[in-house]
Amino acid sequence: MIHRSHNIDMLHGSLLDKILIFALPLAASMMLQQLFNSADVAVVGRFDSPQAMAAVGSNGAAINLMINLFVGLSIGANVIVARCIGRNEKAGIHDAVHTAIALALIGGVILVAWGLAMARTILTMMDTPDDIIELAVVYFRIYFLGAPFIMLYNFGAAILRSKGDSRRPLISLAAGGIINVILNLIFVVGFRLSVVGVALATVISNVISSLMIMRWLMSEEAPFTFRPSELMLGKSYVIEILKVGLPAGIQGSLFSISNVCIQTAINRIGSYASAGSAAALNYDFIVYYIVAAFTQAAVTFTSQNFGAGNYKRCDRVFAVSMCAGVGFTGLACLVCYVWCTPLLSFYTVSPEVLSYGEIRMIHVVAFLWMTNIYEISGGCLRGMGHSTLPSVMVLLGCCALRIVWVYTVFAAHHDFTTLMNVYPLSWLITSIGTLLAYYIIRKKRFA
């Protein structure tokens, strides 16, 4: 039986301490996941070859293209369950939980089929260098075999977080991640399996994390208890989850499309640029996960309070989440800027690879604090049931601008630094648009 200490009362009392209690374990879990995933890059970079490192690292944008679409639906599950909690609808919580898990399984099966069929096509379209494409295809296909477990973890974790439990998802990731690192070393160093080894280790770690989450859900107190025999696709809950989650998923996928375009441009520069970008990208993810954690806190706290009609508290959720997110992310950005070379040396000792990685750290990672503005504003909008508008802002400000930049400014200069500069520019434009949208909609909904 779940102990009450796993829950957070989001409707009453102070906010800062509760948001930190929610967000920091969530940030730690996502960082931990990225650290364990980056072990794939580090192990092949240290014990195999730069080509293997580039093959694993260059897969990120293509993999996220589809994974983000379905993981975005988990945001919808989080919002719907949290809203039912705010309204104290116990039957609604039960049905939403079982509908969410059913959608996770369906999404996982679709991803397996897509990944196996489209691996080579997608990587070829990205102009993946000839010396790494075969390794990249192998990693891509094996990775997607674990897609159902990725979906189960994300939807299950979203359900737990909807009631304030961000600690157990951290525990499950830690367990799976430790095994991932151990298996990486065994498969790559011991058995010389190269990218096959790190891909298998990733799949196994995802299986372990998802099974732990599902075991906890099956032992929860009613109405959160998950029973496989009661899986369902409640029409109203499917519609609501899709209404909130699909725009977020499409946003993630469109974001990935723009990143695929940028990765394609990086690939055209060469393997060293691809490897250096892949190394720096690990820290890009780590810093961004702080943003994502406070965004998720904003979504969940806003959903519960909006469902309960606590509109003034929704305003406080926005302010506290924004200040805390900018503060914590800014500190992480400063660390990456000051110690960029030592941090990158964890992944590679190649001077050529390091030089490209340093450019990305200084021109991109150091400015990631800016993403709090549009992510948290968009998160609060989603908590109020408005998911399409923040997605449109990201589509125009980030995705469209980056694609245009690749085919105009970068095409004219063909310079790695010029390519990286589009990131902070796109964040600035998107932040202004999303923040304005938040204040306009907030005024109408809270009137």
Image: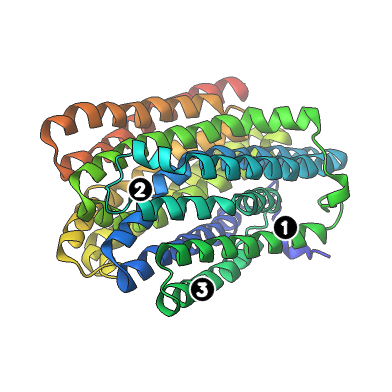
Tell me which label, 2 or 1, sits earlier in the chain. 1
Left/right placement of residue 383 relative to residue 340 reads right
Left/right placement of residue 364 relative to residue 291 reads left
Q: Is residue 373 visible?
A: no
Residue placed most toward the observer, 178 or 285: 178
Q: Position of residue 255 (x, y in %)?
A: 42, 36
Given this view, does label 2 or label 3 mark the residue nearer the observer? 3
Q: Position of residue 336 (x, y in %)?
A: 29, 60
Looking at the figure, which quarter contains the N terminus? bottom right
Task: Give me the disc on residue 55.
Answer: none
Mark pair 2, 3: CA separation: 34 Å
Left/right placement of residue 99 relative to residue 306 reads right
Element assignment for label 3: helix
Residue placed most toward the observer, 374 or 36: 36
Circle 2 residues within 10 Å: few <14, some 14–19, many ≥20: many
Q: Quadrant of residue 441?
A: top right
Task: State yes or no: discs 2 and 3 in contact (Cβ < 8 Å).
Answer: no
* Residue at x-position 55% and y-position 73%: 179
- The correct choice, above or below, for 266 with respect to 178 in the image is above
* Residue at x-position 12% and y-position 30%: 412
* Residue at x-position 35% and y-position 36%: 125
Element assignment for label 2: helix
Q: Which residue is mark 3?
A: 183
Mark pair 2, 1: CA separation: 29 Å
Task: Give me the disc on residue 369.
Answer: 2
Q: Which residue is mark 1?
A: 7
Tell me which label, 2 or 3, sits earlier in the chain. 3
Q: What amino acid is labelled 1 in the image?
A: Asn
Q: Position of residue 388 (x, y in %)?
A: 54, 25
Looking at the figure, which quarter contains the C terminus? top right
